[in-house]
């Protein structure tokens, strides 16, 4: 085969547009559990790199940033930076992680929502060290607070376009008043910022998360509004470096869902933006990561109930929150050695958390489960470990990364002592 630079990602059989759960090698997953135990997050770094190549092929002239909130693991940030992808940071912690991973200031956008004072202090401090860093404000008040801190550097404005899309109402940010300055006040806000000495460099908006092909018209309308706004800003305020239309590119979680045609999304985006002087910027998150990760969990209890066979596992909503938070669907596969020989039956997979919402699936047809079986939960690379918690005083799981045939531990498994350590170090009892 030719070198990867000579192969179009769209035609590369080693870089399919979606990686299904069935494509993961069951014996290899079982081997990882023998060494690292469960619950265990597994992330394929090579797949992250392949997904980046596909996006770069579809958007060759755009600036691509990675929305770090999807998975801020240092290995992920380093991989994407080495692939020429910048980092979009939604918090001071993500900003610190991006810089620690080797990002230059020009590769980072800090796009916090209602940032606390200490976060702004850190961002302004880092901007002094990295003057090419861009801070994006989502409120006039944030601009005022930046000025109070002596900041007059690179400033972008987050705009609320009044249109939202995405897989769940909780992630349709484009029409939520929490996010951004209303678009009809954007020009005057930016003009005022420029008069006050800020270096106004761009505008930003995000329509929502998990946008599918069915929502392409909403995406097109959103981008068209942003293109019109960019032309108005360039006419009234001055040239812009970038027009950031966010990310939110969806991935198929269900087997019957086809992959997003990212080339079609790119073409629709370019057509909708129209002629602007600013560089088009996108900032996907889950598209890079979702199908690059699985969560491995062990069956500990099988209970026959009147309504269902309830299968208890050692992962729960503290390990993977999306099903409880968004009613999200994740594929589940029994990867035990003899699973293919068993009769399939409807099963409800639940975790150990004392909440009725701690359920991964209900009535899912799977090979009959036995205590000790190993289950794999697919599409767990994005918003999996990032949303994990210590609720019920449960330690967070370990995670490993696969790259070039090698395995490395990227996050150590927490112990109960790690959960109680803040109390002990504070001098309190109970640890």
Image: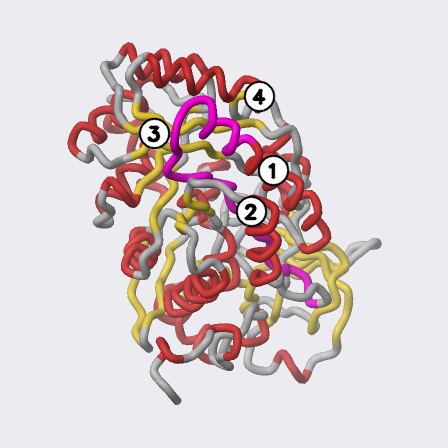
**How far is the residue under mark 2 from the one under mark 4?**
20 Å
* Extent of the magenta region: 229-255
Q: Earlier in the sequence, mark 2 or mark 3?
A: 3
> Which disc is residue 326 wearing?
none
> Tags 4 and 3 in contact by the CB under 8 Å rule?
no
Q: Earlier in the sequence, mark 1 or mark 4?
A: 1
Examine the rendered structure and indicate whether residue 94 appears above or below residue 84.
above
Where does the image place residue 44, in percent across and percent down from the top left? 41, 67
What's the residue at 59%, 20% (across, down)? Answer: 184
Name the residue beneath numbered marker 3.
135
Confirm whether residue 373 shows in the render: no
What's the residue at 68%, 55% (across, down)? Answer: 213
Name the residue beneath numbered marker 2.
248
Name the residue beneath numbered marker 1.
171
**How far is the residue under mark 2 from the one under mark 1?**
9 Å
Badge count: 4
Q: Earlier in the sequence, mark 4 or mark 3?
A: 3
Confirm whether residue 362 shows in the render: yes
Examine the rendered structure and indicate whether residue 325 appears above or below residue 121.
below
Where does the image place residue 34, in percent across and percent down from the top left? 39, 71
> Tags 2 and 1 in contact by the CB under 8 Å rule?
yes
> Which disc is residue 182 wearing?
4
**How far is the residue under mark 2 from the one under mark 3?**
20 Å
Q: Earlier in the sequence, mark 3 or mark 1?
A: 3
> Tags 2 and 3 in contact by the CB under 8 Å rule?
no
Mark 3 Cα shell of 10 Å, populated few (<14), some (14-19), many (≥20): many
Mark 2 Cα shell of 10 Å, populated few (<14), some (14-19), many (≥20): many
Q: Nearer the viewer, mark 2 or mark 3?
A: 3
């Amino acid at each position: 085969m030719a070198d990867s630079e000579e192969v179009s990602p769209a035609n590369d059989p080693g870089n399919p547009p979606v990686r299904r759960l069935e494509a993961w090698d069951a014996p290899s997953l079982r081997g990882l559990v023998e060494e690292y135990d469960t619950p265990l997050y597994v992330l394929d770094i090579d797949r992250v790199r392949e997904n980046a190549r596909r996006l770069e092929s579809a958007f060759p002239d755009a600036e691509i940033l990675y929305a770090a909130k999807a998975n801020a693991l240092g290995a992920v940030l380093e991989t994407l930076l080495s692939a020429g992808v910048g980092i979009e940071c939604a918090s001071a912690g993500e900003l610190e992680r991006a810089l620690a991973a080797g990002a230059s200031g020009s590769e980072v956008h800090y796009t916090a929502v209602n940032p606390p004072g200490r976060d702004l202090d850190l961002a302004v401090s880092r901007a002094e060290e990295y003057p090419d860093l861009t801070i994006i404000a989502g409120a006039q008040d944030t601009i005022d607070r930046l000025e109070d801190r002596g900041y007059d550097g690179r400033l972008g404005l987050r705009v609320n376009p009044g249109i939202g899309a995405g897989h769940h109402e909780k992630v349709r940010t484009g029409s939520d008043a929490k996010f951004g300055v209303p678009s009809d006040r954007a020009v005057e806000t930016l003009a005022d910022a420029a008069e006050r000495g800020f270096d106004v460099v761009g505008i930003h908006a995000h329509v929502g998360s998990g946008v599918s092909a069915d929502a392409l018209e909403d995406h097109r309308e959103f981008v068209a509004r942003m293109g019109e706004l960019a032309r108005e800003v360039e006419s009234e305020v001055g040239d812009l470096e970038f027009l950031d239309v966010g990310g939110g590119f969806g991935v198929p979680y269900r087997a019957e869902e086809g992959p997003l045609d990212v080339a079609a999304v790119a073409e629709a985006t370019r057509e909708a933006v129209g002629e602007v002087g600013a560089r088009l910027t996108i900032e996907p998150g889950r598209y890079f990561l979702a199908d690059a990760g699985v969560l491995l969990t062990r069956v500990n209890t099988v209970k026959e109930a009147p309504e269902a066979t309830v299968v208890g596992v050692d992962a729960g909503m503290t390990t993977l929150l999306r099903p409880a938070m968004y009613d999200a669907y994740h594929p589940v596969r029994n990867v035990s050695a003899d699973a293919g020989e068993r009769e399939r039956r409807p099963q409800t997979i639940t975790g150990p958390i004392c909440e009725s919402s701690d359920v991964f699936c209900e009535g899912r047809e799977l090979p009959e489960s036995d205590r000790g079986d190993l289950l794999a939960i697919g599409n767990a690379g994005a918003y999996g470990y990032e949303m994990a918690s210590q609720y019920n005083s449960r330690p967070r799981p370990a995670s490993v990364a696969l790259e070039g045939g090698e395995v490395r531990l990227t996050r150590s498994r927490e112990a109960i002592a790690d959960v109680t350590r803040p109390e002990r170090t504070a001098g309190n009892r109970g640890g």
